[in-house]
Image (tube, rainbow, N blue to C red):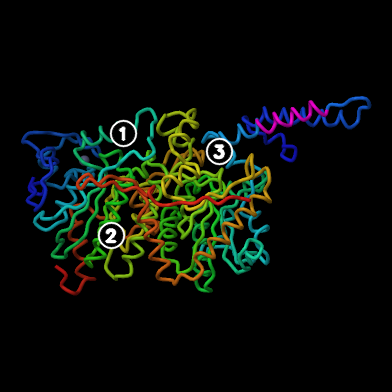
Amino acid sequence: MSNSNKEYLLDFEKPLFELEQKLDEMRTINMTAVDVDLSDQIQALEQRVDELRTSIYKNLTRWQRVQIARHPLRPYTLDYISSLTTNFEELRGDRSYKDDPAIIGGFARFLGSEYGSKDRTIMILGHQKGRDTSSRKHRRFGMPNPEGYRKALRLMKLAARFGKPVVTLLDTPGAFPGLEAEERGQAEAIARNLLEMARLPVPIIVVVIGEGASGGALGVGVGDRILMLENSWYSVISPESCSSILWRSWDHKEDAALALKLTAPDLTRLGLVDTIVEEPIGGAHRNPAMTTQAVGRSIAAALDELGDSSDTDLITRRRAKFDAMGAYDTSGNGKAHSTSEAPNKVATSD
Amino acid sequence: MDWFKRQKKGIQTSLDDQIEVPEGHWTKCAGCAEIINQRELSENLMVCPKCDHHVRIGAIDYFNILFDDKQYTTFDENLHAIDALEFVDRKSYKDRLTDARSKTRMNDAARAAVGNIGGHRTSVAAMDFSFIGGSMGSVVGEIVTRAIRRAHDEKLPLIIISKSGGARMMEGALSLMQMAKTSANLAHYNELGLPYISLLTDPTTGGVTASFAMLGDFHFAEPSALIGFAGPRVIRETMGQDLPDGFQTSEFLQERGFVDSVIDRRQLKNRITNVFDLLITDGNT
Ligand SMILES: [Zn+2]
């Protein structure tokens, strides 16, 4: 806790923070005061801190996970690019209207050799949120306009032309619901990406690193492997908007988060996600380096798995993967279909 | 009256009973507030004879408008939604489904059929707004996907008629992935060189617009339909200002380059037939 900023403390972290502070004070007294030995008390408190930490983070509610997914100190796309790659060559603009800073991307050298694979050139792109007031505004809180999706598509087609795999990182509260976004065809831009990503002749690895809100996330989210960080969320709508529509009030976001089944374990059960990437206890923001490394290992493994697939096989299998997604009952012949029958696996960070 | 009568092969559905209109019934037009004879209205394909207001109609109604002699075969009527998320808001999804099924006598918000249109055998999927706001869940996604696949496998032209409030929240990420599933199958269908006509009707919004509805070779829209990604209320709140008149209408989208033609429902069949006549040369009937 000591390395995370107190002003960003989430409600449910407060009891732990207070206990940790007490522990720090005790340690200071123990070190500085003469004739005082608090070793026993410190040891007991350390144990309580450990227990509390475990009980909080092993029993996170869905809403608490949403809060962690939105934590302002959580690693963003640029953090992954700087820790997992070198030689990043950023590409900008959709070649038609303008550049959208809510989505960034470019070619880079993925340091696969550090994660049990080999170094290779990839196209890496994703939503980018800002860290302070001005960069948040500049990045539009990671909410792309149509030109963001069109830039992403341009980059992916470029990757295909050079035969380089694509890695996309999803972290958006949604596509920007603005007047100009509608005028320039937000829906068309997202739809076009879904179609083109479905037939891109190079491997695509998708990682949900934070918020995966609706079509705004899926617009760069069609791929051969879908990875999700342990405390990220992915659904058709945000808990707040869902609350506002179905409960006709903003007050039911926790109920909505529960109802939407939007966490990585939920999506794994529904057969929509291949791999959960474990986060450090307390969430990615507690140890960004450990988090990006875990993601690096998962990307490396996924790239190795997909490495030798031929283009047509790859596209056919990608389509089959999405074809299987859905849950319905064919009452006519008494056979139910659900993607949750699909096998899944969990990657660990150690 | 004529166009409502159905002599199709295959299963008769009870929807016929609902749309048989007795003599002497009158209705107030939502467009011009004139009192219109119901029978006159249905003979006019549910377009107001006074002001051309297009009354919202169901999937079966479009089948009857488009297919030659109202002859067609329906598919996938055995698909039923299940409550995979055990979703409960103020009402459970299970109850919503039960209510919607009994109210509409449909299984879900889309239907698929194959029949001839102007002599061209065509695969058609049509959404129906009366079932939970035409929202797209797993069943709608699967029905649309199978209609695309049917068109692909039998080498038929394709029409998808969109009419949707967007994704079905009660199916969470499962409903979101239907966007990817339908779009991936359209990518596959595109390889064939057969036309896909997307017909956008009132309303076409959210995840349906951001997937198959915007991926047609031809985008036809009924007049004055609401078409968009985000809802007008959300955009108004984001912008903190009123939206211009005609924003997110068919005509607006045509002007912005996202719709090829705004077409009166009474001309729809002729225009679709024209496209097929122009592009399908192998006598595929
Ligand atoms: Zn009228």
Could you say which quadrant of the image residue A31 lies in? top right
Residue type at the position of mark 3: Arg
Instruction: Describe residue A123's horizontal placement relative to residue B56 as left or right.
Output: right
Q: Main secondary structure of the magenta part?
A: helix
The quadrant of the picture showing ligand 1 is top left
Q: Quadrant of the C terminus of chain B?
A: bottom left
What amino acid is labelled 2 in the image? Ile
Q: Which residue is mark 3?
A: A65
Kindly check if marks 3 and 1 are in contact, taking CB atoms under 8 A apart as contact: no
- Residue A68 colored magenta? no
Q: Residues within 10 Å of mark 1 (few under 14, many from 20)?
A: some
Q: Chain of mark 2?
A: B
The residue under label 1 is which amino acid type?
Lys
- Residue B80 at what x, y percent from top left? 26, 43
Residue A207's spot in the image, x, y percent?
54, 54
**Which quarter of the picture shows residue B87?**
top left
Marks 2 & 1, CB-CB < 8 Å contact? no
**Viewer-closest of A141 and A209:** A209
Circle 1 residue: B94
Q: Which residue is mark 2?
A: B148
Question: For the residue labelled by badge 2, is the local secondary structure a helix, a strand or a loop?
Answer: helix
Q: Secondary structure at mark 3?
A: helix
Local SS, label 1: helix
Q: Identify the mark nearer the N-term, 2 or 1.
A: 1
Q: Which residues are magenta?
A: A39-51
Q: Chain of mark 1?
A: B
Quadrant of the image containing the N terminus of chain B: top left
Q: Can residue B224 be seen at all in this image of the molecule?
A: no
* In the image, residue A48 lies in the stretch drawn in magenta: yes
Measured as percent of width and height from the top left, residue B158 is found at 25, 61
